[in-house]
Image (spheres, rainbow, N blue to C red):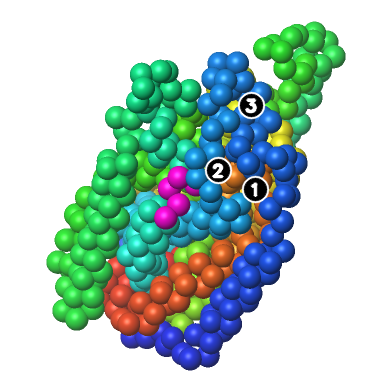
Amino acid sequence: MTEEKFEFTAAIKKKIGFIALLGFLSVVLGAILFDPSAGHHGDAAGHGTTQIEAEHHGDAEAGHGASDDGHHGTSPLLKRIFVDFWINNVFFTGLAIIGVFFFAVQYVAQAGWSAPIKRIPLAMGSWLPIAAILMLGTFFVANHDIFHWTHDYLYHETLEDGSPNPEYDEIIAGKQGYLNLPFYLARMIVFFGVWYIFFRILRKNALAEDLNGGEDYWRKMVKISAGFIVFFAVSSSMSAWDWVMSIDTHWFSTMMGWYVFASWWVSGLAVITLITATLKENGYLKIVNANHLHDLGKFVWGFSIFWTYIWFSQFLLIYYANIPEESIYFVERWQNDHYAPYFFINLIINFFFPFLLLMTRDAKRHAIFLKIVCSAIVFGHWLDFYLMITPGTLKENGGFGFLEIGLMVIYGCAFLFVALQRLAKSSLVAKNHPMLEESMHHHI
Amino acid sequence: MESGKNFILGIYEDEDVLLKAVRNVREKGVKIHEVFTPFPVHGLEDALGYKRSRLPIAAFMFGITGTTLALTMMFYMLGIDWPMNIGGKDYTPLPDFIPVTFEMTVLFAAFGMVGTFFVVSNLKPWGKAKIFDLRSTDDKHVMAVDLDKNSLSPEEISAALNDSGASEVNTKNFD
């Protein structure tokens, strides 16, 4: 009963390849249809400032905003593609590391119910090295287009001839101790490196357990997982500051680390649930029954609310205090024709929809509801990252169309391909897991 | 037979025996009043054929009452009765109302559920608990069969309990 192997057949590969091809066509179509003068402030593309930015920073920092992009000539299309790459890099890195995190949490919590599905989150972790390459690559090519703080000219108080530098940005210069290129890259490399090492060690032990059995591997993995969780607690927050919050360099929020983690976590749970439900429907995972799905459903439902709680905690304080340097973040997203619709769609897809649809016990026990809600959540949280990253980089020139959808689909297919290929390489169920018996009798 | 309510009690030592006994006894047509166990026994509700609790529905109703009350209260107070300018916001800013609404919803749902539980379990200060067998809080599982609700004779019921693996079969009377 427990000896199962997932077969990654040519038919599935073809299907994923076909969807990826559609994604590619969508990107091409998006590039052809791209109108560089689109947006409310067509002229803004040239000097890179926006109405809001100008109004906001207008008096205090006159002149600074106006030089955002003036120093280099990336075309608007290319810039938008770079930003789309960054959204997907951050989002799919999150899915991969949440796979490892979920796996580790199951060990630290000494959970029994999840024993037969543990291989699925573990397989998601195999995206990590690719995510690292893509993220570093995108950063090297496009750092000036995505991160305003990477511009060297912001940091010099005076020009070479001794006159005051009109581009000097006191606030950004004040953050140089943390936000500088070498330290930033070192953090990125260390995070990915350590995450990947933990992933490798956990996977090695899991496979050794398959061969040799016994409780020793399980006990060892509890310890390793505890170590990983401590590192992940710090690194997930810092990566949120680095990869997401530093885009809006002047702005900061103490909730951002949690916010990004919450978004990653719930979308990772949704992906785990989706893969589990789909495998179950195709005759795999014989141990898994409605009780296991129910538990996954509770996870997804509960953490949708958790995300909303974090979202609202960040929003309410800023909204209530109404300090300009803080509320600019929501002014750019909420009171902006470009992003306002997505601002509300984000809340509807990620809170109201799962909250109402997954509330009942029956909904959580039936794969069809889980599949509908989880698909919506995965897209919804991609949109959440879109809303975190695009307004700060593309300002009024951002958009949502074939380019975004296409690139998201390509990334999604690649992620799924890597994860499923890894899943097919070893036993689908951890057959010697000491808690497998408990999981078979799982009943809620 | 004594007056009042009469019960036959089966005492079981082991939860596996108990689970099988519950199914076995019910198959023989005995209607079980209640089973008392010192710790939660998984699958007991299923074996007893209990329907799902309606407590979640009650909780939802209590919760929605709290939501409505909170919103009505705040809209009345800050919108109609005594409008105040707070930080230049609207008189009735919905985002500001969310925490209070949430708290009232949770408060009502929680208190409502506790109250419901008290009523359903007949827990009141002057109430007297029906204790079938004190050992059910220690190490014995107690299955109580209400004689008034069963058409089988006391002898048949006792025999059924004995056959199902009860370590002892007693009678219990409540006046």
Q: In this picture, is A261 found above or below A25? A: above
**Three-letter code, disc 1:** Gly
Q: Do labels 1 and 2 touch, CB within 8 Å? A: yes
Q: In this picture, is A11 found above or below A251? A: below
- Magenta residues span A141-145
Q: Where on the picture, by quarter, is residue A69?
A: top right
Residue A254: x %, y % from top left: 44, 30
Question: Of callouts 1 and 3, which one flags the residue occurring earlier in the amino acid sequence?
Answer: 3
**Three-letter code, disc 3:** Ala
User: What whole-number distance in Å separates the C-alpha atoms at marks 2 and 3?
Assistant: 15 Å
The answer to whether marks 1 and 2 sit on the same chain is yes
In the image, which disc is placed on residue A393?
A: 2
Left or right: A397, with A87 as reference point = right
Is residue A143 one of those drawn in magenta? yes
Residue drawn at x 62%, y 20% as measured from the top left: A58
In the depicted view, which residue is nearer to us: A425 or A283?
Answer: A425
Q: Where on the picture, by quarter, is residue A371?
A: bottom right
- Depth check, mark 2 against mark 3: the one in front is 3
**Three-letter code, disc 2:** Thr
Q: How many labels does the image show?
A: 3
Quickly name the residue at label 1: A398
Left or right: A134, with A404 as reference point = left
- SS type, badge 3: helix
